[in-house]
Every structure is written in C-alpha cells, then in structure tokens.
Image: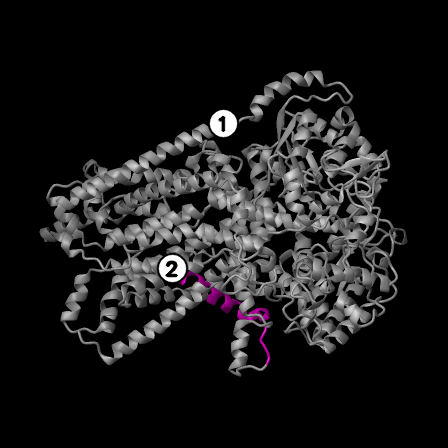
Amino acid sequence: MERVVEIKKQGLLEKKKKMSWRKIKDQRYLMLLSLPFAVWIVIFKYIPLWGWTMAFQDYTYASVDKPFWSQKWVGIKHFTALFNDNRFYLVLRNTLAMSFLKIAFGFIIPIIFAILLNELRVKKFKKAVQTISYLPHFVSWVIAAGIIIKMLSVDDGLINNILMFFNITKEPIQFMMKPKLFWWIVLASGIWKDTGWDSIIYLAAITGIDQELYEAAKVDGAGRFKQIWHITLPGIRPTVIVLLILTIGGMINIGFEQQFLLGNPAVEKYSEVLDLYALTYGINLGRISYGTAIGIFKSLVSITLLLSANAIAKRFGENQVI
Amino acid sequence: MKRGGQEMSKTKSLLSLVLCLVLCVSVITGCGAGKNKQTSKDDNTKSNVEKKEDDKKGTDIDTSPITLTMFSVDVNPVETGFQSPVAKKITEATGVTIEFEYPVGDVAQKMGIMIASKEYPDMIFAKTQELTQLVQADAIVDLTSLIEQHGPNVENLYGEYLNRLRFSQEDPSIYALGASPVDEETWAPVNGFQLQHAVVKDLGFPKLETLEDYENAIREYMKKYPTIDGQPTIGLSLLADDWRWLISVGNPAGFATGAPDDGNWFINPKTYEAKYRFTREEEKEYYRWLNHMYNEGLIDPDSFVQTWDQYIAKISTGRVLAIADANWEFGSAEDALRADGKAERTYGMYPLQLTKDSKHQDFRDVGYSGGNGICITKDSPNQVRAMQFLDWMCTDEAQILNNWGIEGIHYTVEDGKRVVSDEEYKKRTTDGTNYKKETGIEVYTHPFPRWGRGKLDSTGNPYVVDSVDLIKQRYTEPEKEVLKAYGVEMWKDLYPSRDEIPKSDWGAAFLVNIPAESEIPVILERCDSIMRQSIVQSIIAKPGEFDDVWQKAMDELKSSGVEEMNKDFTNLVNKQIEFWK
Amino acid sequence: MKRSFLEKLFDSILYIIMIFVIAITIYPFINILAISFNESLDSIKGGIYLWPRKFTFENYTEIFKYANIGQALFISISRTVIGTLSGLICSCMIAYTLSRKDYFLRRPIGALLVITMYVSGGMIPEYMLIRQLNLVGKFWVYILPGLVWAFNVIVLRSFMESLPYEIQESAKIDGANDLQIFFKIVMPLCKPAIAVVALFIAVGQWNSWFDTYLYASNKANLTTLQFEMMKILSNLSASQNMAQRAAMAGMVAERNRISPESVRMAITVVATAPIIMIYPFIQKYFVSGMTIGAVKS
C-alpha cells in the first residue's frame, strides 16, 4: 500500500514538474539555450500585437496624431460590419474550400513524391529529378498564371489541342471561365508549382531513418513495397503529422496572389479570397480598423484550428505540435 | 576523435569566415551612413538662417544648394538621380536637387506606413485618394500663403483655375498644385472604337458611324478572310485583366452612348444629377449589342480570360480586326506591328455610337481639375524653399527647359522661332525613353505644374514640343490613305469637336473630392465588383437570358446601396460646382 | 538481390512518371530562359516556347545597367550568409530545448512559439517597433526580426525528438552537460534537418525585398538584389504607363525598347540562378541515407 502511494506520489511529483531550485540549476543550460529566444519572440512577435486594439477603435489617418488613450473606442463595430457583409461569407467559403481541397488532395502528393523519389536507384537521376522538380516554386505566380491561362485557352491552348486531337471534344472548352472548375484549376496548378519544394522536408525525414532498419528488413526477406510500408512510412509519420497539424492551422491564410492572377470576372464569385477582400476593403480604402479586425478574425480561426488538430492528434496518440 | 578534430577546425574556419563577413558588413554600412551627404539635417540649419531673409514678397529666391526629398505616387522611370543636363540647369537656377522616392508595388501600404510613422519627405505628389488621407492625417500645409508670398509664377500659371485647386467648401485650403497641364489642346482622340486600316481599305472605306456599321464591317471581313497569316482571324477582342476591364469593357459602354469619361459616374450636364453609370438604360443596350456580337462569334472567346500580355501579343500578330480600347493600352502592340512592317494592321479610331442620336464626347472640355498634385508637408523644414522651387518651375525659363532642352544643344532659335532639328527630333521619337534619360527633357514635366500642349508663350512659340504638323508627320502610309478616303486630315476631325459638346462644370468626375468619412468608395468598390461579374455574365449569356442577368445585377446594386451612393455623390458634385463658381 | 518482375515493372513506371515530372516542371524555366534571351519587342508577339527567336542580351544589360548591382549583390549575399547561420544556430538551440521532454518550460515556450505563426499585429505596429528599436535603415533589420521562424524550429524539433534518447542519456551519464550534448552529439546527427532548414532560411533571405522596401528603401548601401529587381520591374511598368500617358496626350510616340515581361523573365533567371547553383551542395545532405548506428559508439 505504502509502496503504491509512494509510486503515485513520485508520479505526481514528476507530473507536476515542480519548480524547485534544483530543477532550475539542473536545466540551466537548457534555459540558456531557450530563454533569450523566448524574450526575442515576445519582443518581435507579441509586442506589435498592441495593433489589435485598432480593430476596436475608429482608427483612421486622422487618428495618427492622437495619443493612444484618446482614440475613439467603438467596441466590436467593425466585427459586426464584417459579419454583416454578405461578401465576407462568400470569400470565406472560397478560402476554406480551396484550402480544404489542398489538404485533402494536395497534402499527400509531396509525400508520395518524396517516397517515390527515394526509390530511384540511380543517384544522378534522383538528384536531377529532385532539383528540377522544385524549379516551379521559384517562378512567380505572375509568370506561372500566364502560362496556365495560355495552356487552357481556347485559342491554340495546349490542353484543348490535345483533347481535340484525340477527339474527346469537338469544340475547344473555355476552362478558365467555368466557375465550378476554378477551384480544381487552383488545386492542380498549386500542386504542380509546389510539390517539388514541399517534398524536400519529407526527403529529409526519410534520410533520417536509420538505414539499419532497412538492412534488417531485407534480411528478413521483405520486398520494396513491404519496406516502404513498414519502415519508410512509419519513419516519416511524426513529420507528416506535425506538418498536417500546422497546415490545418494555416487553412485560412492562403494568400491571394494565385487566385487573383488566375481569376477573371467570370469566376470572381469563386476566386475572391479573404486576403484579397482584406486588402481591397481594408487598407486600400484606408480602413485600417476594418483590415485589422479581419486580421484578428483570421488569427483566432487559425489558433482554433491548430488547437483542435493538435488535440485530435493527441487523442490518437500521435505527435503533437504543442 | 580525429574526426572530431577535423570537424572542429572546419567549424573554426567557418566561424572566422562569418566573423570576417560581419566585420566587413558593419564597416561598409557604417561608412555608407557617413557618406550619406546632404541629409536634411545639415540643410536644416542653413535654411533656418535664410528663412528670415526671404520672408519678403517677390521673386528673390534663395539659390543656395539644398536637397529636397519628394515621394511621388507615380514612378518616374526616366528620372536618373537629378544628374542630367536639364536637371543640372535646374539646380543651377534654384540651388535645388531633388531626391525622389517611389512606391514599389502597392501604394496604399507605403502611405499607411508613412502616415503612421510620421516620417514625411519635403514634398509629396499624391492622387486624390492619398491626398484625402494626408489631409486627414493633418500632414500637409495649406499652400495659400506660400503662394501669395513666394509663388507669383504659380499664380500666373494657374490663373483663374487657382480657385479650383481648393480642397472643399469646408476646407478651402489649397493643398496641392495640380499636376494636370493647364490649357491643354487635344489633337488626337484617346478613346474610340478601333478598326484595322486593312479592313476599311478592303471593304472600300464603308460608312462608319454606328456600331451596326462596325459589326457589319467586322463580319464581312471575317467571312472573307477566316485566317490571317495562317492563324484564325479574331473579330473584336476585349480585355478584362484586373483594372483594365474598366477601360476596355466598362468605358466603351459610356462612350458609345454619348457619355463622357467621368470614371464610373454619369452626371447630367443640366441637372447635375449623378448616378452610377451602369444603371443607365443606354449602357444596358450597349451590352446587349456585345451579347449579340458574342453569340455571333464576332468576339474573341478569350476576351475575359486573357492577361494583358496575351492581349498585346495577339494584337501584334495582326489578326485582331477590332478593339474597343484607349489608345495607350495597346500602343506597344502597334509599335510591334509597325516594326514588323505591318502598318496596315494598325488601327484607326472611330467615334462610333450605338444609335445616331448621340455624340462621342471624347473631346469634352473639363476646364481644369485639381485632384492630383504636389503638396508640401507640415514637418518639412524647407517649406519656403520648396515653394520657391515649384514657383520657379512655373516660369517660362523652366517650362522651355523642361520641354525643349538647352538652347544650342537640343534646339535652336531661328527668326524668333524655336526649332528642333530633324535629327534631334528623330532621336526624340525613335528612342524616347533613353533620350529622356540622357538629356532630362520631359522628365520634370509631370507631375510638376506645367502648361499644356498648344499653349503659346509671349513669343508665340509653343511651350510643348508638339504641333498639329508634327502629328501629321508621324502618320503612317496606310493611316494617311484611310484619312484621305474619309475626307479628313486628322483622326480628331472624325470626332465631334470640343465646342459641340456640353462643357463640364465639375471637372472630371473621378477627380471630385470625396471626404474621408464617406461611404462612397466602399459602395463604389462593391458596385464595381457586381457589375464586373454581371457584365461578363450578360455578354456570354444566351440572347434570351440577357435581360434576366441584367435585372439581377440591377437588383444587387440596389441592395448594395447604389441609390444612396448616387445621392451622396450628387451632393458632392453640386458642392464642387458651387465651390468653383 | 533478386528483383521480382513486379519490382522491375514498378521501376519502369517510376521512371516514366519521373520523366513526366521533369517535363512539366522544367518547361516553365526553359520558357523563361528563352524569353529572357529574346528581343523584347519580338517577345511581345508571343509564341516563344523553348528557344529564343531573336537572340539578345539586351534584357540582361538593361538590368545590370540600372541596378546598383555590386552593392546589392554584396548585401544580398551578406544577409543570406549571416542570416542563415545565425538563424540556424538560434533555431537549433531553441528546438533542442523543446525536444527535451524533461524540460520544464517546454510546453509554455512551445506554445508561445507556435502561436506566432498565426498572429500578427499588422504592418504598422511592426514598423513602429522596428523604428523604436532603432533598426530602421540598419543592416541588422535584415537579421534580427527574422531570426527564429516557428516552422523551422518545429521541423528541427521533430527531427531531434526522433533521435533515440539513449544516446543523450548515456552522454549524460558520462558527465556531459546539456550544452555539450547539444553541440557535440545532437547537432551532428541532425544533418538532414539542418540542411533543409538552412535551405529554407537562405532562400527566404535571398528572396526577400519587402523589408528592404519598408525599412531601407532610401539607403543605397543597404539595397538587396531582389529589391533592385523589383524597382526595375516597377520602373518598366511605369515606363509603359508613361508611354501610355504620352500617347494619351498625343505626344511623342514612345518607343519602349524593353518591355516588363521580358525583363521579368530575366529577373527571374538572375534571382534564381544562384540558388540553383548552390543547391547541389546542400542537396547531398538529404538525398541519401544515413547511419545513426555508427555514432552509437
């Protein structure tokens, strides 16, 4: 009985991680390695958050001169305006839809690519493919969108030419003007552009897997596929989960350049995203408070998503981010 | 452990390399900071001493060396550090060197930071929106007293229009010296419907007055020549890339139905009632015509998808028969065509209308519109010097220098007439950009105060190097042929002249001052977005659906507050007209 | 090692897939190269795919003529090298402490860090902070604010966590302190992760121009290569606008020899070439297997 209590006590003590001076002395090097940066983070990332107060004021260019305390406080007026705007829901839908598609289909492709790449035997070819595959990442969306639009055009566009050559269609199809197709075009072009670059992390993760495991598996008679399934995949699982959680957290932050450049008035109902909305109706019209309110909204959504994804991961016994 | 040793020495050498680099960087950036001559601080003391002396009226200007900083919303690509011969002359006369700063990309963000951090240059060239923000932030000076004391030439240049530079009734300060040229003649149309010379020639120079004539010409030619140079012929190509939709898709609706270029407004010249232009019945009919054209296959199917680059590329191949654009939007394509020897594939400009009842108002007289201009910031220690500089830029000496160059080098005076030699003129026109960069000519015209084309000075010579004759000289052969066939000497002759069109009492509507707290910009943005989408929908819809699509758009506009906006804007217009009387 | 028929089939299909991947990913780059070496006025007409129609260096000379290239290059390289090294060390340090499950500040600091990925005070407060810290117009504004990216730290931490803890434990028993364990044992084992993070930071530093724009746009001695490129692009677009305005005024017909599109291509090449050249040196760290076992001894 006593033993049990003692063990329990020990467990509790460890769980609590009591802040004894002993502990601090023990971990002083860890603190040295981390506290300066914690301070740095607070300075550079948390101090500017005072800007969030602008969302609760009527901050205009006229307010710049006035000191902080004499600003006009309007509570949640800007948030109410935001939630009353029909357009807001539209752009939110677009943003989340495209993100969701990217996670559902686009997340897994770099992983597969990395694994396939790893299976290439000829080192030179492997390196060449890897290097070339990330090149589109460095091409700006301005150029990339031009290429894609041309490729999908009805006027001697590559895709239409192929379709008509194989008699799949008689008339060229105006892909970029079909609203329902837009999200898929964004997905596909995003995959094309970023797969090579995104796969680098997974390649690094694969490299970190102990080669001995492979040796042992081979000795046990496991073929390539078995090796991939039992060693490679579990080996990169922590990395995958962590990245998945982070990606889910970032769902609402997809930027707008790609959608803006690929879009056109015919598909605008599907192409306008939250970041573009914030730019157009926020700072471009001098409405700083409104823009800030949108920013806060995005942050809150992101953190919620992050914590939820994290909690789910924890529940399934996976790696967590926090 | 050997491996460890090697690693350590590797790390050591890496560290020392980095340290060296850090040292170098600090030295160089440190040196640079010191080298940064002419900071406003140094001149601060100088100008403070002089301020007392030139507080008297008149044109005795201080010519001691000073550097003034200026942020310009419009990038000036031919400005090269104030080192050109013309710039040097300016410095000689005023002592001033200007250090320009431009936005890279988005202006709104740069303005936001400038205002929030309160770090202002001496002068700012701003457009209406930024000007409103600067006034809101109380950052710029009322120039009225500075003009009275140090700006006699400014007064002379703007004359009766000085009044129009005032901000508003509630705040009659003059905040900015208008950048639009004063008393400018227009000798060439800017907006119209374009049709290739080859088309009109081939069809025997048909009558071109209405859009129906246009349509027939396009249709006939397309039937005759389904391909050009091996590629399919395209009838009318439009452009909807980003803001350009307004120019190619939006504006023509107004131009074809007798409306002038007032941005997205239509103001009744008699009642001064303003409304959002797309609510006009006439413009609806224009889009019905486009819908008809689209369904007949006479419109480029890629019109609403293509980027501007692709649009230009298409035009430069010579297979686009017609465009409905402003001449500056496709200028580079015409350059390419001419360079390729395909001058007959360039375009003539026709003031076509939907019906015979209206007139093309491209040559409307807007009087003078303030709106955009150069302002002086409150925090600047060099306000007087800045005004003296701007004042000098208004003198004849400056105007001639900026337009013509230096006498004896870039032009000569023969029998009292200013003449640019043919050789020099050729340099000016064939590689304009480099010429400007090297000489400094026409670099400091925009956005500084200036006289417009056609204005003559006291010696009877024009301020600006351009004339009707020079324009005619530049016409290509096919152009001359077409003009002759239509019985006119210049393109502008096809258009209703300035006198035939009601004058605008409000300037240009898109330069009307909108107060900062107004909801108008927001509602306008929303309306533009609705119309942008709806117009495209209506054009590509089946003919029977057109009315429904359009009605839906009108309903959406109503629910977005368009009527409120119309009322508000009408008030503003009326205020401006009153204010300017 | 006998390869079954299935495996051979797999290999062939793999090669076909990879060749397809190469084709679609290298095409834009070849296209960009081709246009960049093509005469600008000719490029306007479009239709250039794999090689230039009218070869010229003019787009490149245009860039080099106007940019403050020497200084820009120096600064870009400096900030990339210094930024990468400093960022790397700092990220590794904090990542290590977060990888130690026994560290009592692990969760708070971790949370603090991750949240930063999704919150921002906005451009204006950030600008004011930089100004108050006296970093405006100084070289260190390129290094200090961007020192630690949460994402990189998480990547490194993941990697470190996957290392068998026994290695660290046995070192502890041998008397090593945390610092020594960090530098001598953990870091060398994280080569792939370090290489990847170094790559990310380096590319980020090399490509960034917005901070130059905000904080050092009027300091010629602090300009970066990307910023100079951006200015050129902006100049050329304005040049077109000017031509437009001039044409609008019926004035002298501007002959703009160089168009933004061609220069944009040349800029892409100039900006990306260094990265592509350096890349193989980093690549080797994460494109081949590694043995941890050997270090166990």
On what subunit does the disc labeled 1 rest?
B
Residue neighbourhood size for the residue with mark 1, other residues' Cα within 10 Å, grouped as few (<14), some (14–19), many (≥20): few
Q: Is residue C131 left or right of residue B361?
A: left
Point 70% across, 70% down: residue:
B539
Q: Quadrant of residue B402?
A: top right
- Does B144 appear in magenta? no
Residue C41 image offset from top left, x and y in percent:
61, 57
Point 74% across, 64% down: residue:
B344
**Which element carries disc 2, helix, strand or loop?**
helix
Residue neighbourhood size for the residue with mark 2, other residues' Cα within 10 Å, grouped as few (<14), some (14–19), many (≥20): some
Look at the magenta stretch and give its main secondary structure.
helix
B503 or B458: nearer the viewer: B458
Magenta-tinted stretch: A171-196
Q: Of discs 2 and 1, which sits in the foreground?
A: 1
Residue B408 image offset from top left, x and y in percent:
74, 33
Q: Which mark is residue B35?
A: 1
User: Mark 2 — residue?
Assistant: A198
